Image (tube, rainbow, N blue to C red):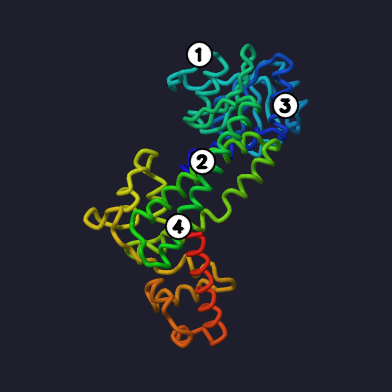
Amino acid sequence: MPESDASMLEMLQLVAPGTVLREGIERIIKAGKGAIIVLGYDKQMEEMRSGGFQLKAKVTAQQLSEVAKMDGAILLDDACENILFANVHLVPDSSVETEETGTRHRTADRVAKQTGTPVISVSESMQIVSLYFGQDKHVLEDLAQIMFRANQALATLERYRNRLDEVSAALSALEIENVVTLGNVVAVLQRAERVARIAAEIDHAITELGTEGRLLELQLDELLHGVARERELVVKDYIADRRRKDSKVLERIAELDDADLLVPGNVASALGYSPAEQGDERPVAARGYRLLSRIPRLPSTIVDKLVDKFGSLDRLLDATIDDLGTIDGIGEARARSIKEGLARLAESSILERYA
């Protein structure tokens, strides 16, 4: 997630339903009033402040509603726990560009851009609540609209997750048969990335919903279970050069826009395959990370040693208990457990594919 998006999400948490600020904003709207609420105070803000009076009162919904009646800006401390000043006239630099038209919104936009401090503007006439943060603006929507959109996205996510599970299971079976192609690998990574992107949209909505989004959050967590780990293991299994960091591959895939993500060559390039090495039918061999990760109580250090020793899943499946026992940290009992575990996983993958 871009840094600006993450910062805006953090700001939205401050005004999500269930928070004191959101309750105060709703009281202001019900009273038919408007407001400018500045979420922080520093030297630059002090120089911009004109008039008003010092308050130093604890932030409560009732206090916010009351001081908003005086029409001037309300200045909070950095923790948004105390009202420092009320009825303040803010004088930002008029040369700061803004596309806003209303007096409150223009002031709030300029203050946010000039100082980098988050500013909330509540429109008295339109009852629109806008959050300004740096160069960004976010209009707080009606909760029912956010919930409707989030539920639609959740249904879409469920379909994509089911498809991801299908292509992931198919990849496992192809790994056992040692007939994996680069196209099979790319298909899994494409689906996993699209799942992650839809999930990010839902997560944004959950942040805006605050306490109203708890059920959605539980559903999202369930649908995302294991997805991040699956992406990492696929990359570890098929990255062209093991010396390259897996995180860099995932970052490069995440940077692709939606159209570029659909181009298999772009994902293959992220994995480190040159144009000459690309092609949906190009054979590739799994190193064995995905299958080994499914064996219970097998430490990652042992998994790394197994991959270093045998180099590919095909050789791992052919290894005997004695072969496995030659690796430091693997005794006879663990070697037998690994051998039997791989055999069970191989059998279940094949049965699942052809059942």
Q: Position of residue 144 (x, y in %)?
A: 65, 27
Q: Position of residue 326 (x, y in %)?
A: 45, 87
Specify the quadrant of the image occupied by residue 202.
top right
- State the separation of the CA atoms marked 2 and 1: 34 Å
Q: Position of residue 18 (x, y in %)?
A: 72, 35
Q: Which mark is residue 101?
A: 1
Q: Residue furthest front?
A: 355
- Point 64% across, 24% down: residue: 142
Q: Residues within 10 Å of mark 4 (few under 14, many from 20)?
A: some
- Amino acid marked by disc 3: Gly
Name the residue tied to disc 4. 170
- State the separation of the CA atoms marked 4 and 1: 56 Å
- Amino acid marked by disc 1: Thr
- State the separation of the CA atoms marked 2 and 3: 32 Å
Q: Residue furthest top?
A: 125
Name the residue tied to disc 3. 24
Task: Give SS at disc 1.
Answer: loop
Dots 4, 1 in contact, CB < 8 A: no
